[in-house]
Structure formats: structure tokens, C-alpha cells
Amino acid sequence: MNRWGKQALGIILLAVIWQGASWSGIWSSYILPSPGKVAKALWTMMESGVLWQHIFVSLKRVFQGFSIAFLLAFAGGAAAYELPGIEEYYKGFLEFMRNVPPISLIALLILWFGIGETSKIIIIVLASFFPMYLNIRKGFVSIDKKLLEVGQAFGFGRWRQFIRIVLPGAVPDILVGMKVGLGYSWRAIIGAEMIAASKGIGYLILDAQQMSRSDKVVAGILTIGAVGIACDKVFQVMIGRMAVRGSAEGASGHENQGFV
Amino acid sequence: MRIRDLCKEYQVAAKRIEVLKGLNLDVDNHGITVVLGRSGCGKTTLLRLAAGLEQADRGSVEMGSDAKMGVIFQEPRLMPWLTVGDNILFGTGKRQGRGRHRVLNRHLDYLLDLTGLKGFEDAYPSQLSGGMQQRAALARALAYKPDYLLMDEPFAALDYFTRSQMQKELLKIHQAEQKGILFVTHSIDEALTIGKKVVILEDGGCRKEYDLGDIPYPRDLLSEKIGKIKKGIVEEMEKTGEIGMLP
Ligand SMILES: Nc1ncnc2c1ncn2[C@@H]1O[C@H](COP(=O)(O)OP(=O)(O)O)[C@@H](O)[C@H]1O
Ligand SMILES: [Mg+2]
């Protein structure tokens, strides 16, 4: 059996256990909604179009937050390379912030930025900044000095050194950072939409919870997982297109940095 | 290129190491000048100073006001994300382009031909053998149209046969391009194969000089004339090798 077959079998097995458990009647259908009930909830929301709206709104927030976090992480990483002295000043603060779960800041964010989009996007930025920053910084700082000397021998100035050696050399780490950051920003959507949202996948789940609709909660969770995988795959395809052969392989990064 | 009274010292763990102590050397602007010396005698240091990659403590490297240097390091140092063609053009600011966007570049074609890399312009460095990578590095230096080539044991990491092949090719390229070459090596045979002038670097300075200008290429290292020179060089290096060696 191939890779896909095995993965599918694992999922089918889980679904069978789930179905069996709900048939056994040990748990009420509120505590453990049956697969059929969840599928029906999913189907209803798809048919009426609400599900797509929720996904769209959440994706938009994630994309905004992710973009801002990427720009900050890129700037921070580049600064760590170009101005190594200045990094010491913000290192301590970043280390501190890295250990503070963004959700714990919700109260303050609402106080300072209100309950609009700003607060939600800041949550996503905070959740995805650190894994991106650490990877991008690593890419810039660990650039091979021997390659830099090649540029120096050709009389390259600072800017050309950066554009022609440092940046392309850091691309594999930048991509790893973006991939990991994308995952973190998507997973932060629940936290972000805890703040007075009226649309979005996170809102869907929290609202279903209020309404005691556990089937919709499970449907929302399945959607989050599926969209997360889809985003990752789309990103993977985009990386493949960019054809960074020779250096893209062997790129590894910190997969587990930052918290939600 | 005239090198005068060149001094360079390094500080290693509170210990001062004088690597070059007032080195003088003239580098012919058409021939191959070989600096021969044991490992750790300061060959790389000399080359890095000449290339401007490091600052001398004292002394000077004089050449034409806008003379350009092409540096070939001991390792190929190709950019792994660029194709061979783009690596060769790296110092020129030009691009090779892909597929339909390929830019016609006569000089690149000429260099690919000269270094035997024709057909590999779209390959990536990781797909080449060590010898081919070093040839690409040589082509990259030549594409820059330098007045001098500075070569730091470029063939030391290659196996015997590839190395002698590369020496032959270097001589061929030298015939075609007529650039001044400063070549450093620890191999006496390599020095005798390619050097127009062979200089022994020992104890921080150029201790002895051999003029091989009257022996044409390609050379037979087993000939009587070269055998005699080799004997002299070996004796010289063994004599000075015992004293004044760096740790
Ligand atoms: N950047 C450096 N810092 C400290 N010591 C160095 C440095 N570069 C070279 N040296 C020392 O200078 C000596 C000569 O080195 P090098 O020029 O590399 O020798 P070679 O190329 O002839 O083998 C060695 O003893 C080496 O340890
Ligand atoms: Mg050396």
C-alpha cells in the first residue's frame, strides 16, 4: 500500500471507532456527536454558504496578520545581520514576549485597540512572528563567510553583498520560517476570534459552543484542520515553483517556537 | 605587481604570530609566479593581503591604479543557488537567463569552451565534480576580466590525475589569456610544472627565487634540468624547515 493509502486507512479507522463509540450509547449525542450528525451540520453550512463566508473571513485575517508578521520578522532578521550590535537591545524583550501566550494579552489588546479587526490581527501577528523571526534570522546570520569573501573580492558594496549573497543564501530558511509561521497564524484564529467576532471559523466554533451545538463545534474543528492542510499544500506548491534548487534541500528550521 | 616589505601578524590566544615579516615579491604581469612553501608558512595570508581581503600591518602591494584581481580560493566557493552559467557571470553583474530568456553572451560561451564546461551551463554546482567546480571558479574569475589571477592552492583537494589535468588546462588558459598569475602551493612538482618563476616562502619572507623562464611548457619533470632545480629546492626547504617554523 502506498503512502496515501496508509494515511487514508488511518483516518477511516478513526472514523469507524468514532461511529462505533457513538452507537454504543455510552456517551450522549451531546458529548459525542455521531459522524453522521457532524457531516449533516457541515453539509447544511456548506449548502447555505455560511461555511465559505466564515472561511473567507478567517483566511483574510490570517493573511493580514501573517503578512505583517512576515515583514516584521524579515526586517528584524535583516537588522540582526546588518547591525549585529543593535540586536542586544531588543533581544531580552523578544525573549520575554516569546514566552507570553498571545491569548493572555486579549484583555489588554481590547483595552488599547478596541474589539475591531486590529486586536484580532495583532493576536495573529504575535502568534506567527517568533517562529518566522527565529528562522529568518538564522538564515541571515549563518550565511557562509567564505561566500561573502567572493563578493568582497569582486568589490561588491554592502547592498550588493546583501542582495546577491546574503538574501539568496537565506532563502531556504526564510521559506521554512514562512511555512511554520503560516501554520501558527492559522492556528491562532480561535484566539483572535475570541474577541467579539461575528464571522470566521473561530467565531463559528465559539458560537456553536454557546448554543450547545457540539456537532457544529466538531464540524468547525474539522474545517480548521482541513483549511490548515490546504494552506500548507498551496504554500508548498508555490515554493516548488520558485525553483531554488541546490540550496532548498537540507533546509531545516525550528518547527516548535512561539505559542498560542 | 610589486609587493614591498609586507608584514602581517595574528593574535592567537594572547600569543603573537608573525606570519609575514617584510616580504618582497615582484609578480610578472604576464607569467605565472609560484610561491612555494610548507603548510602554515603564510601563503594564504599573502594572497589575501594581495586580494585586499585583509589589511597589512605594514608594507604595500603596488599595482596599476585600477588593476582588477580575480581570486580563486582553495575551495570553489560557488553560489549553490546559481547555475554554472550564472556563477561564472557572478562578478560581472550580468545574468545568463533561462530558456527563451537566454541572453547571448559571447564571453560566457568562450569561457565555457575554454574551461571545458560547455553543456553544463544550466547545471547546479552540487551536480558537478570537484574538478569541474574548480574550473567554474576559474571561469568566474576570468569573466571578471582581471589583470591578475590570484590562486590559492586551487588544485590541492583534487586527486592526482585531475590535478595534473587541471595544471595542463591552466597552462592552456594562460596561453590564451596572458594574465599575470600569482599561484601559491605546497607542491614542488606543481610549482615546477607551471611556474615561470618559483619563489620559496619561508620564515615570513621570500627566501629563494628560481627562474624557469627558459624552460618551455609542457615540461617534463623527469628531465635533467628540472631534476637539478628540484633537488636544489628540496635541499633549501629541508634546511630552512627545521628552524623558524611556525607552531
Ligand atoms: N585569521 C587568522 N587568525 C589567526 N591566525 C591566523 C589567521 N590566518 C592565518 N593564521 C595563522 O597564520 C599562519 C599562516 O597561515 P596561512 O597563511 O593560512 O598558511 P598557509 O596558507 O601557507 O598554509 C598559520 O600559523 C595560521 O595559524
Ligand atoms: Mg593556505
Image (spheres, coloured by chain):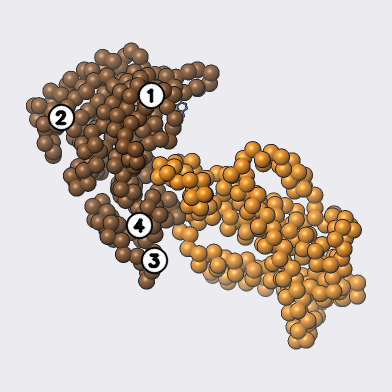
Chain colours: A orange, B brown
**Residue B70 location (% of width, % of height):** 33, 42
**Residue A162 location (% of width, % of height):** 52, 49
Three-letter amino acid code of the residue under disc 1 = Gly
Q: Mark 3 points at which residue?
A: B98
Q: Mark 1 points at which residue?
A: B59
Q: Name the residue under label 4.
A: B85
Q: Label 3 vs label 2: CA separation?
A: 46 Å
Q: Which of marks 4 and 1 is in front?
A: 1
Q: In the image, which disc is placed on residue B212? A: 2
**Residue A257 location (% of width, % of height):** 69, 51
Q: Which of marks 1 and 2 is in front?
A: 1
Residue at the (75%, 61%) spot, across then down: A124
Label 3 CB less than 8 angstroms from ligand 2: no
Q: Label 4 vs label 3: CA separation?
A: 10 Å
Query: Is A227 in front, or is B180?
Result: B180
Q: Label 4 vs label 2: CA separation?
A: 36 Å
Can residue A184 be seen by looking at this rendering? Answer: no
Disc 1 packing (10 Å; few <14; some 14–19; many ≥20)? some
Which label's residue is closer to the chain start, 3 or 2? Answer: 3
